[in-house]
Amino acid sequence: MRLLHFNALGRLVLTDFRGKTIPPYAILSHRWSDSEILIEDISNRTYKEKEEGYRKLQFCAERAAQDELQYFWIDTCCIDRWNNNERSKAINSMFQWYKDATRCYVFLSDVSVSTATELVQRSDWEASFRASGWFTRGWTLQELIAPVSVEFFSCEGHRIGDRVSLDQLLHDITGIPLAALRNCPLHEFSTSERRRWVENRRTKEEEDIVYCLLGILGVSMPTAYGEGEESARSRLQAELEGASDAPSIIPFSQNPRFVGRESQLADLEAKLFTNEQTTTTLAIVGPGGTGKSQLALEVAHRTRQNNKSCSVFWMDASDKDSLYQSYTSVAQKLSIPGWDDDQVDMKQLAKSCIEEMSARQCLLVFDNAEYTTLRSGGSSTTEAADLADYLPQFKLCSAIFTTTNIDTAQALASQNVIALRELTRDAALRMLQVRLERPLANTEQQEAEHVLRELSYLPLAVMQAAACMKAIGMTVQEYRARLDEHKELAIEQGGDSSSGRLQDSGVKDPVAAALFLSIYEISRDNALAADYLFLAACLDRKDISLDLLEAASVQAREDAIRVLDKYALVARRPAESALDVHRLVHQALRKRLQVQGRLLQWTQRTITQLLQVFPDGDHSNRSKWRRLLPHAQYALSHSATDDNNEERLRLASRCAITLLSDGRYKEAEELDVQVLQARKRALGDEHPYTLTSIGNLASTYRNQGRWKEAEELEVQVLQARKRALGGEHRSTLTSMNNLAETYRNQGRWKEAEELQVQVMQTMKRVLTDEHRSTLTSMNNLAETYRDQGRWKEAEELQVQVMQTMKRVLGDKYPDTLTSMANLAATYWNQGRWKEAEELFMQVMQTMKRALGDEHPNTLTSMGNLASTYRNQGRWKEAEELEVQVMQTRKRVFGDKHPDTLASMGNLASTYNDQGRWKEAEELEVQVMQTMKRVLGDKHPNTLTSMHNLAFTLYSQARHEEALALMATCYQSRVQALGGRHHDTKLSLFTLTGWLAELGEGQ
């Protein structure tokens, strides 16, 4: 949970209390306007620009202060709306947050009281109070009931009264019993009575009129926007009636209009739970639009109805993030600790769910399992998840997968694969009638059969045809005539026949023809809605944020989306303020634009819109750019390269920065090279934009351990910026800092220190001591001190930096975590392993949650923690972490990356400490030889690997080889590091000790 407060300097601060004790706080209840302050406005410090929202925020802060509360909570700016997992958890946690608040302030924007309440008559405000829209909204019901204290204020901020003093008036307005308004426990009111409290209230989304009751009824049920109010009510009733049954989650109600697939349905039911010795796994495979998910949904509901002791859980396997969200819902349903913790280790939470399921009979439905390896859905790093790791392996559980990929189906379910094709004629006819919600007249039967034949009996096309007919009141005869016209158009645009370009692109003619007809009608009804379709065609088809959809007003945008929903062309995601487009619809839209010659035009328009929304790469924007990144990458990859297309280059550059921040170096490099080449051709080598692009590319090289390439570019940038901007310009100082880091990575510590001291002193003078860039320069200098064995100097700087960063940036900010890890490393160098372990553990856990398990910084923190285990003789713990780090780095970075080699060396040291010298030697020889080729003979890391190998040889009584190698190591360290360096002294100490032990003197 995040809370707001104003600090001593009057700056608005958002503090993250997840994992900490939550202090007393006030909470605001209000109706949203178009100018609410959002979490990104606070991060970017632009919150004062939204006058109406800031006025409400100030009001809440002032009232809280009067009630001696430092912290306060406002939904719009304390929930990260770009983080889908967080938003979903917030919906389920909202009732509890209001209940736990010390004070709840209701801000009534439509009730005016010009002076303090004590000086005016009740009759002056009562009429507008009774008529306030606040009492008509669904979600404000829990905001009235849940808190211990509720106070009402006018739009001027004047207090009207509280729930106690106004209880009779509130009862008259809402019909809620006085006892409920006086904090009587809710369980003392019947379920039916509590459900009546929401009567005559309204919500923006029809399903919310049901969802807003969940906390009041004490029900845990996942939201499924798009299901409709009737379906949501049906699911709620099932939850209430099935409270004593096995816990289940089916986020969609049973489809009363389900038709066809009787034989496949019987086949599925016959195979479930038939083998008591092993898990039964089944797969439903078929092209898009053939009704796989609907068939699985019917099986899920029938299983729950026919077997009350069987839990049924619906899992979204379309990507890793969606699967994690599904397991979060399961954890909540099964009361597993951590489901409401945004920073929980999702892998561990999923494992806990699987362990809990092992004790019960259950059916898991994994929907949209296209691949056995799940990629990120845009909310995290490139880290992939093996679907097999998230499947229960016990005999009481069965699983059903839906997929379009036959290879995936066979890999997951072996021979238990049920293939779907188009519907039969009779089933398609029944589906059309059900979707039209009316029987077909005898005169329509023949026309309907013709239409269905033209649509190839494809469920998706039938559904869209019925939606189109319903939307404009078109008869089947009228639709047939119009469909024939648009089928000809589809053939003209797709080729000479059904095997033309539309088919080649994977788009079925029936979908294209039905879609073209729908687009034509939509264009006549709402041109903005048609524009949204074409924009969606140029984006990734899933999770299209409404922020990307421009409109003159929020209402205009909402009207356009409702039109698309009415025609069944999009799937809405109100909880995420987003929508999805079916794969076949997406392909057909792109093909239509392409053959009309408008695809590039719309792609450029999409890039323009993305650029307006896509944030900079700051960590505070991570949730936002992770969700927008798939769309930006899609648009960029399908756009024409043009050196003069400034918007495309700027978007590509922003994407590269965010990819770099997420450790996706190769992808960042690819974009950086594109941008740099275009900048050079269009602007020349020394234009500021070109220099920035060179510096960005150098950063990707440096992070990949390609230090010589990075140095070459960084020297070029530094020299050019010194000439153009002078030695104290911030851009020049950044270049110096980057070059110094590259020197340090190459073991050129004196050169690095010289630059870093200069940068730090200048930044302190130009930018102040607590500026983020100044702190970074101090951190870098401290690292160089540590590399030189000057640990006291390093520690002194690192403690100062860490304390300042915690105060200025917060303890979960990446720069703060880096400073903590650096200090821990210095403790480790000094043999202070317990202190090091404590810091390393804290850093690793936070990085896993914030950045993902496979982010380079996370892997470094895991490796560091393993080193502290090794030094404490906890070799099994060390080995487990080191193997994981090494394997991940090999896969992500390759065998020759310096970080990979370092992890191999660390694992070898752990083997050595356990006396597993052959395994240690094998790794150490590989590391030393590779480091010599990649880093050079005299690089400090190469010399460390040489020292370690010599030690392993000596441990095996191969004394001559060991002595020779250690002597070489010592001589090289004298040359590279100097005689006073700790590593040089260590080599000399080891060498002389061995000689004395062997009786050969010095």
Image: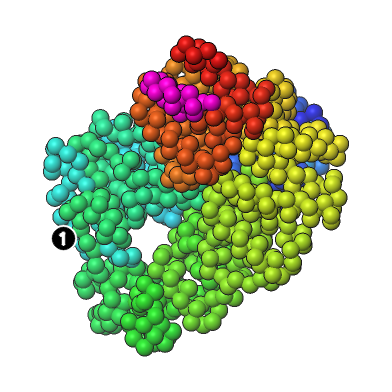
Name the residue rendered at 13%, 41% in the picture. Answer: 275
- Residue closer to the observer: 173 or 23: 23
Q: Position of residue 443 (x, y in %)?
A: 26, 83
Q: Residue at x 25, y 70 (%)?
A: 422
Specify start and end residues of the magenta stretch as a single range. Answer: 949-967
Q: Is residue 268 above or below residue 188?
A: below
Q: Name the residue: 43% across, 29% down.
A: 908
Residue 644 seen in the figure: yes
Identify the residue under disc 1: 263
Closer to the camera in the image, 115 or 583: 583
Does residue 38 appear in the picture of this structure? no
Q: Is residue 258 left or right of residue 100?
A: left
Residue at 22% across, 35% down: 394
Q: Quadrant of residue 266?
A: bottom left
Residue 12, percent from left and from top: 74, 36
Quarter of the image with the C terminus is: top right
Vertical side of 110 occupied by 770: above or below:
above
Q: Which secondary structure type mostly characterizes the magenta part of the structure?
A: helix
Q: Residues within 10 Å of mark 1 (few under 14, many from 20)?
A: few
